[in-house]
Every structure is written in C-alpha cells, then in structure tokens.
Amino acid sequence: MRAGEVSEVSQDYLKAIWSAQEWGGTPMTATELANRFGTTKANATEVLKRLDDLGLIVRVPYRPPVLTAEGQAIALSMVRRHRLLETFLVESLGYGWDEVHDEAEILEHAASDRLVDRIDAFLGRPRSDPHGDPIPDPDGQIQSHDSSLLLAEAAPGSYEVIRVSDADPTVLAHLAEVGVRPGAHVEVADAGIAAVPVEVDGRSIEIDRTVASAVYLTAT
C-alpha cells in the first residue's frame, strides 16, 4: 500500500505516530493524537481502529499504537514529502524557515511521488531540511540521531547544532536572529537557571531555557 491509497487523515496520523519518537520522544497515545489534531479521543480512536483494520498499526488496549512495517513505510513517505517541500520552499521560493511548516502540511497531501522525486533531484538530493531534520531517501532509509542532546540539558563544552524543532515559528524566528541554526558551533558555559549562556560565532548570548529545549546538539 502506498501513501496515496489511504486518506489524508490516515497519512497525518501515521506521520504523527512515527515523528513522535524520532528524536527520543515517547509514543503517542489516542488522547495525545486527539489533542494534536484538535478532535475528540473517540474520533481519534476510530481513526486508529481503521488503521489497525488496514494493517498499518497494531492496537493493544491501554497502550500507544505501534506502526507495522507497512504503516512505517507510509509514514516515512509522508515525512519525505514534508521535508523536501520545506527545503524547496526555503531554498527556491525564498520562504523563511519559520514559515514553511504549515505550507508543507498542506502541500504534502497533493504532491505525487513523481513530483517529490523531481524536487529531490532539483535540490541536489539534500540530506536534511532547513531545520536539520533528516530527509528519508526514496527507499525509506533515514539517518539515526543516537548522539543528539538538547541545548537545555547540555553540560559546558563545544557543540554543533544539528536540529531545531519547527514546532513554534516564534522560537524559530528568534533563533535565526541570534544565529542558532543547524551547522552553527556553540560553546556552552555553566548552565544558568532561567537561561543557558552560550557563545555563537564569537558572540556571548543567553538563550531562554524553554527556547533551548528546541535546539538539538552533538558534541564536537
């Protein structure tokens, strides 16, 4: 089964279930999925039942749903579409990295696999999107993130920014202003209580701890 053979709602649920754990998060429950999509738990449960009937997830009472191999393949196909579209919007159409998430959420359902592959080739087959999230290849293979840690939890030392969560456009806009993007090198000083003191490109700044929770690092 391909992504285009299931409903847009099913595509969204499969992608959300997969994405929740990509960077070390916990599996999403029916209640959390309902909150994510602004619906009731009963409606979310009905969607999960349909996905279970299609063989795309496994439902176990009182436990979060688990993707089957087929469900994961569709989820990764949607992730690939979303991240390539975000990259195209930033690199080719001049969007800011804080503007593309909602646009890509809409476009990913209309884009065919052929169009997505053409965009991939046009962009030179990028390995990650503007936020540092890796882009699955056409076979669904994706880079692992075993060595990542949050800036809010980092001990003093030297790091490279590898990803910034795109959950909050305001956070993205602020971090762009202070130069905290994927590929930036930061020096973390002694951790503060409300803010994290860092040095970015020779400039000393303090990043609010809530904002720092959106920044993923790897030690250098």
Image: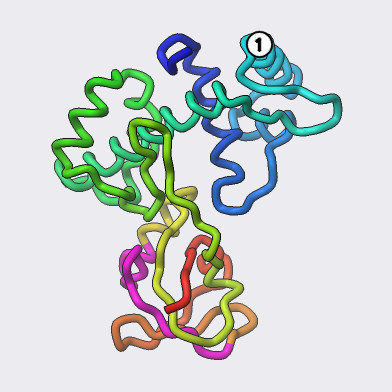
**Residue 91, position as x, y percentages in the image:** 18, 47
**Residue 88, position as x, y percentages in the image:** 22, 40
Compared with 198, 57 (above or below) is above
Query: Dot 1 corresponds to which residue?
Result: 50
Residue 139: say if magenta. Answer: no
On the rendered structure, is 31 left or right of 203?
right
Residue nearest the observer in this picture, 199 or 137:
137
Residue at coordinates 41% horizontally, 13% vertically from top-left? 4
Q: How is the image coloured?
A: rainbow
**Residue 106, position as x, y percentages in the image:** 37, 26
Task: List the single residue furthest toward the right.
Answer: 62
Residue at coordinates 36% horizontally, 69% vertically from top-left? 180
Query: Quadrant location of residue 104?
Result: top left
Residue at coordinates 22% horizontally, 36% vertically from top-left? 120
Q: Secondary structure at mark 1?
A: helix
Q: Amino acid at mark 1?
A: Arg
Residue nearest the observer in this picture, 93 or 182:
182
Query: Quadrant location of residue 3?
Result: top left
On the rendered structure, is 28 left or right of 90?
right
Q: Over which residues does the magenta segment extend?
A: 174-190
Is the C terminus in the top left, top right, bottom left or bottom right quadrant?
A: bottom left
On the rendered structure, is 170 left or right of 36?
left
Residue 183: say if magenta. Answer: yes
Compared with 112, 77 (above or below) is below
Residue at coordinates 38% horizontally, 39% vertically from top-left? 136
**Residue 172, position as x, y percentages in the image:** 39, 57
Q: How many marks?
A: 1
Compared with 174, 114 (above or below) is above
Residue nearest the observer in this picture, 56 or 209:
56
